[in-house]
Each structure stands twice: as structure tokens, then as C-alpha cells.
Amino acid sequence: MARFFKSDFFNFEALRLLSFAPYGGVEVAEFMQAVGEIEDNDPESWYAAWMKAGEKAEVIADEAYQASNRVEARRAYLRAASYQRAAQFMLNGRAPWEDHRILSASETSISNYRRAIQFMDEKVFCFDIPYEHGVNLPAYLYIPQASNRLPGKTPILLNTVGGDATQEEIYFVLPVTAVKMGFAVLTFEGPGQGIVLRRDKVPMRPDWEVVISCVLDFFVKYVGEHPEHELDLDRLVLAGSSVGAYLALRGAADPRVKACVSTDPFFCMWDLLKGRMPEFLIHTFEAGGFAADDMWEYLVTVLGWMNFQTKWEFNHLRWMFGVSSASDVFRKMMEYTLATSDGNQYLRSVKCPVMVTGAAASIYAKPEISTTRIYNTLSHLKQDQKMQWIATDPAEGGLQSKIGAFGILTLRMFAWLDEIFKIDRKPVLK
């Protein structure tokens, strides 16, 4: 497969961005120009190139707006938001609240995205969901236009963000297609995600079912207060990708969730570290008491000198978890598991149908220790209530989160949901 960078990490993140081109998040020539200005494993050149691309797209958007061209204004504002989100991604040598560029680029990205949604064909509502300690979770609700509506009430996709994405970014993965398929979509950013992390400094929590419960409490009330939307709470699917796929599985235990789509999840985050570090070091930490915390900090620092991806991942996990030391990162990773402390399986509490996918070429979660393990643990579900799909070829969804192959993901996903929710679509061809 052709590459943009020698670095697997930079190459993957570039491909991640390019994946949005079919859905309006990238213009190919703008992308290629920016990539040509980036030095491999250099976060500063990455930031500069994508901020430059974002500024150019913003100029085009403003020009289109002045010309009353709502189509090109929407497209260019979406691209500006996409590039600006990407720009701050690699800047994690310091915490997001210590490097002003991270919050600034993030807020500019959100601002341009909110300009874009004014020109979308669908109705889009922005609101804040009350969480804890005075913190609100920002959310978008997309209502499909009349021509895409399904008979009866409108089914709902609740799309949770993952570990390093934003809700503006994930629009290009599922929501952009879901509304065309007749689904209303609710996205939100929770603790440890997007602007809630960067601005409000709220760390992530492993018991995501608490967050989903909070969101659903708000949303169920909202649906009751807005019957004009004709939303169907009896056909609500919860979906997420990568870290978000794990979070979706946690939230799927809520009885208000009627189906779950978990795209390339992990069973236990700690397992992702295995294979990235020598086995004896993994066992040493698990055993405990054989090495001081300072030793683990030194080890992670050395590994970061050797590999930018490792440095980036550990720094991001520090901020996301709200901890400072490497050993605390390790301990937090162990908390993100679908096994319970008493030796049981959390997934036993999931009663709704589940579709779980895997990616053979993933740089993170290998299917045998994630997808297959999760599918097998769902043994209490009937065969027609669960589905496993593991892709091998990158063009068919073999990369993590189905990067570069979102069309295959949505094809499989909505075919499965149509069966689960008994949606009878009109034939495409006559």
C-alpha cells in the first residue's frame, strides 16, 4: 500500500485525514500540498502545514459565503474545521492547557464546524448536556431531511467519541451517512474527550456507562419535549470506534440502548501494551513491588526518545487520564477492561444485539485478543443477536477504525441494523 510517510504513526494519521475526502472533510490537492510540507515525526511541521491549510480553506469558505454559495461555504468550512482539528493533534509535548495552540486550534475548528452546519441539508441542533460538578457535555443532534426519512418514527444513532477524536471529526465517519440512511444522530464529547479535556480539563473514566446514562437521561427528556422530531427511542443504537468502541460496549448495558455497534474495540487496554514492551517488563509491573515508579518513568522516556508514536501515546494518556507518572498511566490502563474485579465479565450485562468488528492490520488492537474475545464473551446472546466482522485487507476495513474504508463499514453496519430494527427499505433499482 502506498505511503505518505515512513513513520507508521504519521502515515496512519495522514490516511485518517484523507479518509474524510469522500464526505467533504478534505480536498485532495489541499491535502497533498500540506503533506508535502511536513517532515516525518516532526509535530511542529505537522501543526504548521495543517493550520496553513485550514486558513486557506477558511478564506474560501468566507468567499463562498459572501457569494451566497451555501454548498461551497459548507464544504470549505468543514475542511477548515478538519484541518484545524488535525493541526493540534500532534502537539502533546505539553498538556493541552499548557500549550495555548492546542485549545486555540480546537476552538477555531469547532467555530468553523458550527458555521458549516448552518448550510447542511439536515437540521442540526447544538446543546449542552449537564454532567457533573457544573461541567456540560457539548452535543449535536442531526435530524434527517424529509426526503431521507424512513416510514414511522425515526431511529436514532448515539455516536460516542473515542480517545483522541472530536465529535466534529467523527461526523465524517458515521453521522454523515446515517442521516442519509434515515437515522437521527446524537454525538457528544464526554470526560477526557475533545473540548471537555482541552478546555475543562476533565479526565476520562473507565465506567462509561455512567456517562451514557447521563446523556440518555437528558436525551429521553428532550425527545419527550420535542415530539415534532418523531424520534424512536425503541430503535436507539449506540456506536463507537477504537477506544470509543470499548466505551460503547460499556454503555450498551443500559436497557435504553437497543443495539450496539463496536468498531475495532479492545477488551482490555492493558493488552494493547503487550507486544509494545518486552514481556518481562510487563510481568514485572503486573507483579508489583519489584521496581520503583521512577524506573518506569525513565523507561517510558527512553522509549519515547526512540519512537515518536510511543512518546505521543504516553503523553496523550497522561492528559486523558489526568495523571502525571508513567506508572499511573499503566495502572489506569488496567482499569479500562471488560472484565470485572470479581472475575466476572461485564459484557454479561449487555442484553441488546451487538455488532463487533476487528481489523487485522490494526496498529493497536489485534482481533484475536479483542474482537474475537468480545464476541465469544457475548455467548449469552442468541446467534442472530450478535455479529462479528474481521477485515483483513486495508481497502476492505483492515486498518484500525476502518480508516480509509468507511463506506464498507457503513454498508455492513446499516445492513445489520436494518435486520435488527426490521427496517424495510425501498428497492434502489426498479
Image: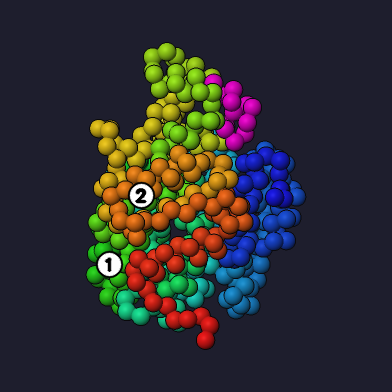
Foreground residue, 263 or 55? 263
Residue 63's quadrant in the figure?
bottom right
Outermost residue toward the front in this view: 383
- Under mark 1, the amino acid is Asp
Q: Is the magenta stretch mostly helix, strand or loop?
A: helix
* Residue visible at 51% across and 80% down in the picture: 428
Q: Residue at x 49, y 44 (%)?
A: 367
Q: Is residue 306 above or below residue 146?
A: above
Q: Can residue 96 be seen in this view?
A: no
Q: Which amino acid does label 2 sit on?
A: Leu
Q: Nearer the viewer, residue 421 or 307?
A: 421
| Residue ID for mark 2 | 249
Q: Is residue 120 visible?
A: yes
Q: Regarding mark 2 in the picture, which secondary structure is present there?
A: helix
Residue 10 falls in image quadrant: top right
- Is residue 298 shown above or below 22? above
Residue 200: x, y in percent?
A: 40, 45
Q: Give the range drawn in magenta.
A: 299-311
Residue 139 x %, y %:
39, 59
**Label 1 crowd bin: few (<14), some (14–19), many (20+), radius 10 Å:** some
- Vertical position of residue 306 compared to residue 428: above or below: above
Left or right: residue 348 compared with residue 200: left
Q: Which residue is drawn at 44% across and 81% down?
A: 426
x then y, percent, for residue 302: 59, 22
Asked if the magenta segment contains residue 305, the reply would be yes
Q: Tell me whether the residue at label 2 lies in contact with that at label 1, contact meaning CB atoms closer than 8 angstroms.
A: no
Q: What element carries label 1?
A: strand
Mark 2–mark 1 distance (CA, rounded to whole Å): 18 Å
Task: Please name the residue that numbered disc 1 is placed on.
Answer: 234
Q: Which of pointers 2 and 1 lies earlier in the amino acid sequence?
A: 1
